[in-house]
Image (tube, helix red, strand yellow):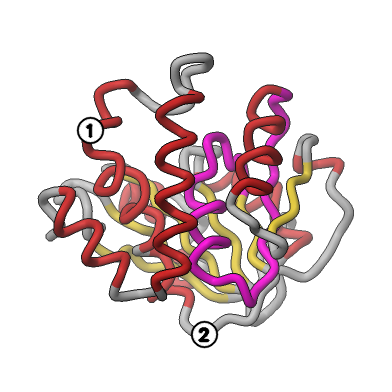
C-alpha cells in the first residue's frame, strides 16, 4: 500500500520514464496554481497530490495491460486519470470528456503546457461525442456504475478494457448489476487507499442487456 508522497512518486516512476515524470511535475505545479482560482481538487489533498491523485491515476495502467489506445476517460475534471495516463503513455491516444467549460479550458491549457500531443479534450457531454471504438474506458467519480456503462456502451467492443476506480462502493456496485452481466467485472484493491477498490473488466456492454 502506498502510504506517503515518496512512495507514490517512486511507484509512478517505476511505470514510466523521466520525461513522463517531468510532464507530471508540470501538472502538479499548474494544478496548485489553478486550484487558487477554481476548486479542481480538495485543498486538503494538495500536500499529498502524488499519493491522492497522480499515483491513484497511474495505478490503472497495469490493469489496462499493453493496450494501444485509444483510451477514453469520462468526466476528466481536473485531469485524473486522463492527463496522468496521457503523460505516462505518449504513444497512445487519450480522449478526455468533460462538459464543464472552466474544466475544459484548464484541461486544454495544461495539456498544451505538458506537451501532450496525444491528448484530445472533448468539451461536451458524453452523449454528444461521436462514436469510436475505445481500447480502454476509465472514469473517476463520473456516475454510478450502471449509468456509466449505459452511457459509454457505444464506445465499447469485445476487447475493451474497463478500469473504473470506485472507492468504497466498488463491490456493491458490481453486485447491483444484472446477474448475467456481473461476471464481466471484478474488483481490485486500490494501491493508494485501503478502503477503495477498482472495478476491472473486459468486453462489450450493451445498454439493452
Measuring from the top left, give residue 129's x and y in whole percent.
84, 47
Q: Secondary structure at mark 1?
A: helix
The reply, left or right, for residue 39 in relation to residue 102 is left
Residue at 66% across, 65% down: 205
Q: Quadrant of residue 70?
A: bottom right
Residue displayed at 35% across by 23% down: 42
Residue 44 placement (x, y as % from top left): 25, 23
- Seen in the image, is 81 located left or right of residue 157? left
Whole-percent x, y for residue 184 in the image: 49, 72
Residue 98 figure quarter:
top right
Q: Is residue 190 magenta?
A: no
Looking at the image, the residue that sits furthest to the top is: 37
- The residue carrying mark 1 is 47
Quarter-of-image position of residue 48? top left
In the image, residue 185 above or below residue 108: below
Quadrant of the snapshot with the C terminus:
bottom right
Find the residue positioned furthest to the bottom. 66
Of the pair 178 and 30, the residue shown nearer to us: 30
Closer to the camera: disc 2 or disc 1? 1
For mark 2, does the 10 Å Cα neighbourhood hold few (<14), some (14 to 19), or many (20 or more) residues? few
What x and y, as percent, mark residue 49? 30, 40
- Distance between mark 2 and mark 1 Cα atoms: 32 Å
Magenta stretch, residue numbers: 74-101
Q: Which residue is mark 2?
A: 66
Frontmost residue, 51 versus 170: 51
Give the number of marks: 2
Q: How would you rate the neighbour count of disc 1 (Cα within 10 Å): few for under 14, some for 14-19, many for 20 or more?
A: few
**In this rendering, is residue 130 above or below 86?**
above
Q: Look at the numbered disc 2 and give the secondary structure of its residue.
A: loop
Q: Which residue: 74% across, 46% down?
A: 121
- Who is closer to the viewer here, 81 or 199? 81
Amino acid at each position: 500500500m502506498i502510504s506517503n508522497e515518496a512512495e507514490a512518486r517512486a511507484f509512478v516512476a517505476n511505470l514510466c520514464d523521466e520525461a513522463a515524470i517531468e510532464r507530471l511535475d508540470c501538472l502538479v505545479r499548474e494544478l496548485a496554481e489553478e486550484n487558487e482560482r477554481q476548486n479542481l481538487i480538495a485543498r486538503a489533498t494538495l500536500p499529498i497530490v502524488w499519493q491522492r491523485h497522480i499515483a491513484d491515476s497511474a495505478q490503472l495502467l497495469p490493469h489496462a495491460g499493453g493496450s494501444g489506445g485509444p483510451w477514453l476517460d469520462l468526466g476528466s475534471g481536473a485531469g485524473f486519470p486522463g492527463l496522468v495516463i496521457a503523460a505516462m503513455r505518449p504513444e497512445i491516444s487519450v480522449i478526455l470528456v468533460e462538459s464543464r467549460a472552466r474544466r475544459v479550458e484548464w484541461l486544454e491549457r495544461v495539456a498544451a503546457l505538458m506537451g501532450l500531443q496525444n491528448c484530445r479534450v472533448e468539451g461536451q457531454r458524453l452523449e454528444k461525442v461521436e462514436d469510436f471504438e475505445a481500447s480502454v474506458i476509465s472514469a473517476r467519480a463520473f456516475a454510478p456504475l450502471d449509468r456509466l456503462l449505459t452511457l459509454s456502451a457505444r464506445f465499447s467492443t469485445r476487447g475493451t478494457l474497463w478500469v473504473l476506480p470506485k472507492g468504497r462502493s466498488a463491490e456493491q456496485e458490481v453486485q447491483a448489476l444484472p446477474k448475467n452481466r456481473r461476471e464481466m467485472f471484478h474488483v481490485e484493491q486500490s494501491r493508494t487507499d485501503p478502503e477503495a477498490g477498482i472495478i476491472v473488466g473486459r468486453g462489450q456492454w450493451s445498454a439493452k442487456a
